[in-house]
Image: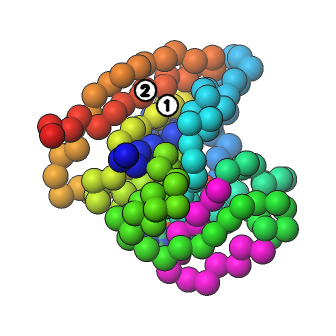
Amino acid sequence: MRSTCSVFCGISIDGFIARPDGALDFLEGDGTAEMGDHGYEAFMAGIDALVMGRRTFEVVMGFDAWPYAKKVIVLSSTAVDLSPALDRGGDVELLNATPEEVVAQLAARGFRNLYIDGGATVQRFLRAGFIDRLIVTHVPVLIGQGVRLFGALDRDIPMKLVASRSLPGGLVQSEYVRRRTA
Ligand SMILES: NC(=O)c1ccc[n+]([C@@H]2O[C@H](COP(=O)([O-])OP(=O)(O)OC[C@H]3O[C@@H](n4cnc5c(N)ncnc54)[C@H](OP(=O)(O)O)[C@@H]3O)[C@@H](O)[C@H]2O)c1
């Protein structure tokens, strides 16, 4: 069975997933409605493990509580201290590996449906050809600068739109799957 790597994130109209300092305040919508979960719980129900970049992990550590009930793999080339997450009940591991190695190692342990999180991390997985599904929720604001979800590619990645949803607060969620020829 093939592994599946998915992305689920909120993004400004101009393509940013965080402000330069990592702030996520702009993801709140236009203030006209209560924000729902945008399908996050349903998405998470199909996920075996999260794979996040070290910088996303650092932002998550600023949250009030550890938010994940699933295995979390933190990617870094450095010795990140995971103890604050472990102390909060997180099932967290550190890995320094290429996307190919991450997917293979996790598949061998039975984790095949992966949620890839963090701008630079998603870009690495995209370049390595491992992203199968993108669920991006556009928030109705431009912020001008920040952390980009997408970056340079050495070839096009054809995607197919499978759903487009209009959500409360002026949000538009687009779900794409990778168009593979073979
Ligand atoms: N809007 C949203 O839905 C959303 C979702 C997720 C994240 N975010 C935001 O995005 C920001 C973080 O994104 P980011 O692009 O700055 O960074 P990131 O992708 O979270 O982390 C990048 C770091 O991950 C490590 N890394 C990634 N791939 C690796 C690999 N294959 N092997 C070893 N290490 C690897 C490296 O850490 P080292 O430098 O330690 O080696 C790299 O510097 C945060 O502000 C977060 O809140 C927003």
The boundaries of the magenta stretch are 71-83
Please tell me which residue lies in front, 54 or 149.
Answer: 54
Q: How many labels sit on residues? A: 2
In the image, 72: left or right of 9? Answer: right
SS at mark 1 in the image: strand
Return the residue nearer the eye: 82 or 150.
Answer: 82
Q: Which mark is residue 100?
A: none
The amino acid sitting under disc 2 is: Ser
- Give the residue displayed 66% in from the left and 32% down from the top: 41
The C terminus lies in quadrant: top left
Residue under numbered circle 1: 138
Find residue 66 and report its horizontal and vertical position in percent.
78, 54
Q: Disc 2 marks which residue?
A: 174
Where is residue 98? Give x, y as percent: 38, 70
Q: Amino acid at mark 1?
A: His
* Residue under the image location 28 percent in, 53 percent down: 129
- Residue at far bottom of view: 79
Pointer 2: residues within 10 angstroms few (<14), some, or many (20+)?
some
Residue at (32, 24) in percent of width and height: 161
Residue 144 included in the magenta stretch of the image: no
Per the image, label 2 sits on a secondary structure element best described as strand
Decide which of 109, 161 is in the foreground and name it: 109
Does the rendering let one see residue 73?
Answer: yes
Indicate whether 90 appears above or below 16: below
Whether residue 74 appears in magenta in the rendering, the answer is yes
Q: How is the image coloured?
A: rainbow
- Calculate the distance from the C-alpha at mark 1 to the C-alpha at mark 2: 8 Å
Task: Tell me whether circle 1 and circle 2 mark residues in contact (CB < 8 Å).
Answer: yes
On the question of residue 131 being in view, the answer is: no
